[in-house]
Amino acid sequence: MTSVIVNDASCLIDLHKVRLLPVMLRLPHRFVVPLPIRRTEALDLADRDWRQMADLGLVTFDLPSERVADALRLRSLHPKLSANDCFCLVSAQCHEGAMLLTGDQLLRQVATQAGVRVHGVLWVVDELHRRGACSENRLISVLERWRDDRTVFLPRQEINRRLRQLRR
């Protein structure tokens, strides 16, 4: 069953660092990125990278104007969320049964309270492994790079648990 997965910037950044974005897009899901996230400079993706991701199935979603007010209202209720976080959550709510892929703790909490399923990039690693879409050696390398990167804020104990499992 294909489900919609709305991606926030933090996950796209972490996946891009280890060149796992194209691999993730092979999974049997519909991957969506809200338009404001696509325009985020922190992603450091060139136009040709976005075209490649689009060719692989990444869909850019422009939030309908009537739902922009929902994102602004959400921001007023949770001022510590960024505008982009709010666009991600409302985008997920626009797609029935969608899941939100984020590494942001507050966004995870707010999305869960709103009834939206939430996962992070470690879920992507689990899915790639479970479906045999990526070699175990590649996943070990990815996890090691994330573990050793001071700009990646993933739970070390979860990374280490997955490393132990993959090395068995």
Image (tube, rainbow, N blue to C red):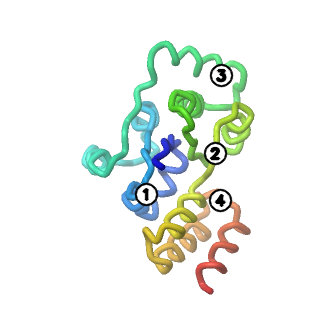
In this rendering, which labeled residue sits more in front, label 2 or label 4?
2
Q: Nearer the viewer, residue 44 or 93?
A: 93
Q: Is residue 69 left or right of residue 34?
A: right
Residue at (43%, 57%) from the top-left corner? 27
Could you tell me the amino acid type at mark 1?
Answer: Leu
Q: Mark 2 is on which residue type?
A: Val
Query: Which residue is the site of mark 3?
Result: 74
Circle nearer the N terminus (2, 3):
3
> How many C-alpha atoms fall within 10 Å of the one at disc 1: few (<14), some, or many (≥20)?
some
Q: Which mark is residue 57?
A: none
Which circle's residue, 2 or 1, is located before the other in the chain?
Answer: 1
Q: Earlier in the sequence, mark 4 or mark 1?
A: 1
The reply to whether dot 3 and dot 1 touch (C-beta < 8 Å) is: no
Which of labels 2 and 1 is toward the front?
1
Residue at 61%, 69% (x, y): give it: 147
Question: In the drawing, does residue 27 fall left or right of residue 86?
Answer: left
- Could you tell me how far apart the alpha carbons at marks 2 and 4 are, in whole angstroms? 15 Å
Tell which tag, 3 or 1, sits nearer the viewer: 1
- Indicate the position of residue 48 as horizontal and vertical percent values: 25, 48
In the rendering, at what x and y percent does residue 124 appear? 53, 59
Q: Are marks 2 and 3 in contact (CB under 8 Å)?
A: no
Q: Pointers 2 and 1 in contact (CB under 8 A)?
A: no
**Mark-to-mark CA distance, 4 and 3:** 26 Å
Residue that mark 4 sits on: 154
Q: In the rendering, at what x and y percent does residue 168 appear? A: 62, 86
Relative to 40, residue 149 above or below: below
Reading the image, the residue beneath label 2 is 118
Circle 1 residue = 27
